[in-house]
Image: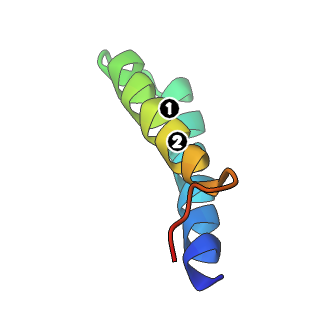
């Protein structure tokens, strides 16, 4: 279950980064948010049943 715990921490930190990027006034923040949200979706899919391999 350590892998799952690490993955959940990674998701939490990426979600925080995405929130910060949304609030950012940087011109490229929209692209950054899209990239981070795509990473989040990939990480979350690994938490689904059958997503993590022993």
Residue at the location (64% across, 63% down)? Answer: 8
Placement of 49 over or under 2, stated as above or below: above
Residue 40 has which mark? 2
Residue at the location (55% across, 77% down)? Answer: 3
Q: Do the residues bearing badges 1 and 2 touch, measured as CB atoms within 8 Å? A: yes
Q: Based on the displayed image, in which of its 4 quarters is residue 52 positioned?
A: bottom right
Q: Looking at the figure, which quarter contains the N terminus? A: bottom right
Q: Position of residue 43 (x, y in %)?
A: 52, 50
Q: Secondary structure at mark 2?
A: helix
Mark 1 = which residue?
Answer: 37
**49 or 13, nearer to the observer:** 49
User: For this view, does 14 lie left or right of residue 35?
Assistant: right
Judging from the image, the colouring scheme is rainbow
User: For this view, does 40 lie left or right of residue 5?
Assistant: left
Query: For mark 2, does the 10 Å Cα neighbourhood hold few (<14), some (14 to 19), or many (20 or more) residues?
Result: some
Residue 17 has which mark? none
Residue at the location (56% across, 65% down)? Answer: 7
**Distance CA(mark 1)–CA(mark 2):** 5 Å
Placement of 1 over or under 9, stated as above or below: below
Q: Based on the displayed image, in which of its 4 quarters is residue 29 positioned?
A: top left
């Amino acid at each position: 279950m350590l892998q799952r715990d690490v993955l959940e921490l990674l998701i939490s930190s990426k979600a925080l980064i995405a929130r910060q990027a949304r609030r950012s006034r940087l011109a490229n923040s929209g692209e950054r948010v899209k990239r981070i949200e795509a990473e989040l979706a990939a990480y979350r899919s690994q938490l689904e049943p059958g997503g993590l391999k022993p």
